[in-house]
Image (tube, rainbow, N blue to C red):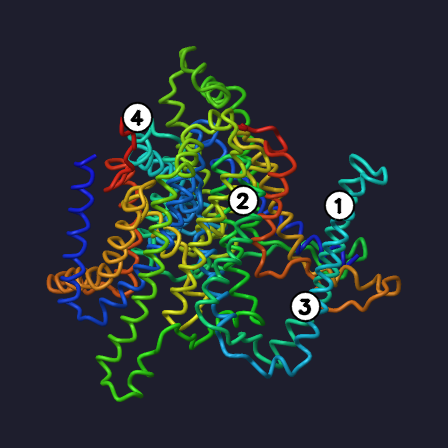
Amino acid sequence: MRQAIVRTVGLYVALVILIIAVGIGFGVPYTTRMLVEAAAYALIALGLNIQWGYGGLFNFGIMGFMMVGGAAVTFISYPINMKFWNSDGPMLLGRALLAAILGAVLIIAARNAWRIGVKGGWRTALIIVAWAVSYLIFRSQIDPATSYIEQNAGFVGGLGLPVVLGWAFGGLVVAAIAYVVGRICLGLRTDYLAIATIGISEIIRALIKNMQWLTRGTLTVSPIRWPVPLPEDYQAKGIDTFTALIYARGGFLLLVAAILAVVMVLLVRAYGGPWGRMMRAIRDNYIAAGSMGKNVTARQLEIFVLGSILMGIGGAILVSFAQILDPSSYQPINHTFLIWVMVIVGGAGNNWGALFGAIFIYIIWLLSEPLAQLLFGSISHWSSAIGWGAIPDIESRSLQMRVFVLGLVITIALRYAPKGLIPESAQSRR
Amino acid sequence: MDQLIFFINKVLVAGTVLGSIYALGAIGVTLIFGILRFAHFAHGDMMTMGGFIAFVLAGLCAAAGIHVPFATGFLVLPVAMVIAAVIALGLDRAFYAPLRKRGAKPVTLLIASIGVTLMIQGVIRLFFGVDTRSFFESEPKKILRFDMSWIGGSRPITFTQPELFMVIITVVLCLALHFFLTRSRLGKAMRAMSDNADLAQVSGINTALVVRVTWIIAGALACCAGTMLALDVSLTPDLAFNIILPIFAAAIVGGLGQAYGAIAGGFLIGFAETLAVFDWSVILRPLQPYIPFQIQGGMALVPTEYKLTVAFVILVVVLLARPTGIFKGAST
């Protein structure tokens, strides 16, 4: 126990030293930017730690959840697009909504057809027909609505509400999606959940990329507001550019760090309490936990949704910090698997481990960009010096190298340190 | 009649080709699952890698001045399949075998396969960049036309020569696999191990050999599927999850662990995707007098951007209705 604490403290001290070194090397504005993003990633990693570390649930769909969070904060906080509200768009969308409700009623009616004596194969057939009809009705309404909006108003625009509300909304929307996914897939085996979540995230990506009427798709939305004053606001008050940047990013960092601290306190308390014990019991032996009267499926659904909320909020924070929603910038590698590496390297099942892993891996990931370019630059320099010529497309190739290293880190960590740098400690104090 | 020919050209040919590719990929996934009990996520990238191996070999052939009356890709395919099988064995030896030896859970192997995915992706992009490539930059894609005027069609049934080859190769490979699994000693051992690994081991089956053979088959078939996909459309380094999803859907629909199920599932998913993005307005236009609404262009069930959802929806429906798949696969 003591050894574990010493190890944890030592690693965190090393982390602080690393951050200070980055601050000296790259300057304070860069470091604050890095820390804000690292804190947002830490929220997401904690979400994955709840799902995978506490509950043993797969989630390879983090990217999709982050995208939904980002789209949600954009929708809430972007200024109102009067062109859309003054056009027929809202009316058309309302009709599409009505069509969706009508479809849902049809499907529910078909599902309840057994009450009037339609049973077995006939009921199944009826349900399929109901789904098909609902789908056609919905498509017949939404298609003209979307093309009308795209042509006349560009996109729906936002609601112009506070940004923090948007973060919460992001968490909420993601929770709803996670609830549906969990209801469908959690009763099944783990591999299916992995496949289903990958599928969901790829579909979400396809939707957000192509739903131009809602998210503007690849045209991107910017600028998205900050919850704290922007550097420009400070500059308007007569503060010089450099200090204004530090003030603004520092303010953002404070806000995100506060959220992270609250989440961390809640998680540590929940982990140590009966709830955390129950979750670990379910993870380690769900049959035994089930026979002790724990509702395994409901609990797993609970943690799946809880973890996903954190992912949604984290994704929302990242988008509002970057001030741009760019659906084509989302890649499974940078978003889903980077976070898996954070949790695996940090230590799945241990909140401090996940937090450490998130910040540490994010810093390494960010620094590896100039490092990889430096490395490839020198190799290229060397190869051209001996007459082989320079490496073509050096920029993109050196970035691809990071993908390889990420994969290598996963496999090495699984083989030599499967429990991570700060492993989960079995808390038996007897 | 023209509508029927259009349907055959657009759906039957494309669906068969896509189904063949999915089937070959899904066989590998399902065999690995049956023997090693984990979902091998690196399969999509093994396919991409196979495509690139064949691409490099085809380039070498072209440079050496070797010309054949069919696409060079098919000439080098056997060699590429051997290389891919060796690489698959190497990947197993380097990354999966140590974990298995430690007695790691299948879940750990699954995560390791994600790591392998990233590594393969990184290597491919490191060497080939992110550009899209085609096998038919230096040679034409031959098109076969079958005149249909004898039954009153004004347009011919057309498909390309590679498409014909792909279907033939798939049939040959599936038959070979069938005879291997049912007639040969090793194939029977494989099926026994897939049913019950412990029982197979105590009855004297060399399980290490079976594992190796599984990787060889899976790697070779993945290479074949990847090359065929590259020959059919184009060779892109970032297929990864766009291809792994339909393949897993095919394997699960057929029942994980069931080789025949994977073939059936592959064709099912292939046709479902093709039918879903097919523009029905051409077929429906002659029926306009009987249809209450106006028929316009672009009447596909699903817009092309959302093709991926088709496989996913089928997957979810099968998971809900019959979690063990159509052919009763492994359920634990």
Query: Does residue B62 appear in the picture of this structure?
Result: no
Query: Does residue A319 appear in the picture of this structure?
Result: yes
Residue A143, numbered circle: 3
Which residue appears at 28% of the width and 45% of the height?
A353
Disc 1 residue type (three-letter): Ile
Q: Chain of mark 3?
A: A
Q: How far, Cα to Cα, is label 2 from label 1?
A: 22 Å
Q: Nearer the viewer, residue A309 or A65?
A: A309
| A3 sits left or right of A146 in the view | left
Q: Which residue is mark 1?
A: A127
First-in-chain label (3 vs 1): 1
What x and y, as percent, mark residue B21? 53, 45
Instruction: Judge if badges 2 and 3 mark residues of a common chain.
Output: yes
Disc 3 residue type (three-letter): Asp
Disc 4 residue type (three-letter): Lys
Task: Classify A168 as above or below A404.
Answer: below
First-in-chain label (2 vs 3): 3
Nearer the camera: disc 4 or disc 2: 2
Q: Which residue is mark 4?
A: B101
Q: Which residue is mark 2?
A: A182
Which residue appears at 29% of the width and 41% of the height?
A411
